[in-house]
Image (cartoon, helix red, strand yellow):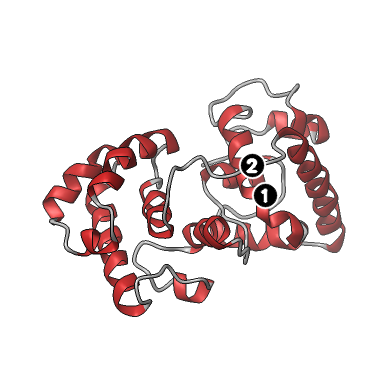
Amino acid sequence: MTENKRKEREKRARLMVAELKKIYPNATTELNWNTHFELLVAVILSAQCTDKRVNEVTKDLFKKYRKLNDYVNANIAEFEKDIRSTGFYRNKTKNILGAARVVKEQFNGRVPKTMEEMLTIPGVARKTANVVLGNAYGIYEGIAVDTHVRRLALKFDLTDSKNPVQIERDLMEIIPKKDWKWVNHQMVLYGRYICTARPHDCEDHPLTKLYPKAALTWPTSR
C-alpha cells in the first residue's frame, strides 16, 4: 500500500467510523450470554450462522448446560443434536467440548484474558478471540473480521486483501485504537440491517454517500 493510498483510506475510515457512531452509538453483540464461557460457545456457534438462530439454540442449550463441567462431561452425539440447526454441528461440537476441557484444565475454569492464550483454545481464531475478549473483558487487541466486516472493508476499499487476518491488520492500521471497541459491532449491524450482502441499490446509504464508488462494487464477498 502506498503512503497516499494509506492516507486516503485512513481519512475514509475515520469518516465512516464517525458516521457509524451516529447510527449505532451503543453497538454491541446481538448474541445472548450470561457467562464468559457461554459467550465463547455462542461465538463459536455463530460461524456460518445467524445470531438470531444461535440465540434460539442457546436459549435451551444454556439451560441444559449450566456449568463448565456440563460441557466437559457432555455426550457428543447428544450435544450434536442440541446444536444441529446452527450448521457444521459436528465440528462445532468438537470445538466447544474441546474448548471446555482446555478452559478447565489449562486455565482453571476461566476463559483467558489474552489473545495468545485464547488462540490455544479449540475453535478459536482471531475473530472469535477478539469478540470474546472485547465483550467479556473490555480488552481490544484487534478488530474482529467476520463476513460483514470483510465484505464492507472490500466494498469501501479499506483493504486489498480478502484474507481476514490481513484485513484485520489493514483496518488496525487506519482505524484509531480508541474506536476498535465499537467498529466491529457497528459494521456488523450496518451490514446486517442497512447494506446487506444481497445485491441492491445502496446509493442513498449513509456510508455510500461518503464513498459513492461503493455503490458500484458487487459482489464484494467472493
- Percent position (x, y) of residue 173? 74, 63
Instruction: Tell me which amino acid carries mark 1.
Output: Trp
Distance of mark 2 from mark 1, alpha carbons? 6 Å
At which x and y percent is residue 91? 26, 55
Q: Secondary structure at mark 2?
A: loop
Instruction: Report the side of 11 relative to 152 (left or right).
Output: right
Which three-letter amino acid code belongs to the residue tagged 2?
A: Ala
Q: Residues within 10 Å of mark 1 (few under 14, many from 20)?
A: many
Tags 2 and 1 in contact by the CB under 8 Å rule? yes
The circle drawn on residue 182 is: 1
Task: State which quarter of the image contains the N terminus.
Answer: bottom right
Q: Front-most of 156 and 206?
A: 206
- The mark nearer the N terminus, 2 or 1, is 2
- Asked where in the image residue 167 lies, by quadrant, the reply is bottom right
**In the displayed structure, would residue 163 be above or below residue 116?**
above
Which residue is at a point 36% across and 48% down the rendered structure image?
45
Looking at the picture, tell me which residue is in the foreground, 70 or 213.
70
Looking at the image, which is closer to me, 171 or 177? 177
Q: Specify whether 10 is left or right of 149.
A: right
Q: Residues within 10 Å of mark 2 (few under 14, many from 20)?
A: some
Residue shown at 40%/47% (left/top)?
47
Foreground pick, 116 / 30: 30
Instruction: Kindly identify which numbered label has been placed on residue 27.
Output: 2
Place of residue 215 in the rendered image (x, y in percent of width and height, measured from the top left):
71, 28
Give the residue displayed 82% in from the left and 35% down from the top: 210
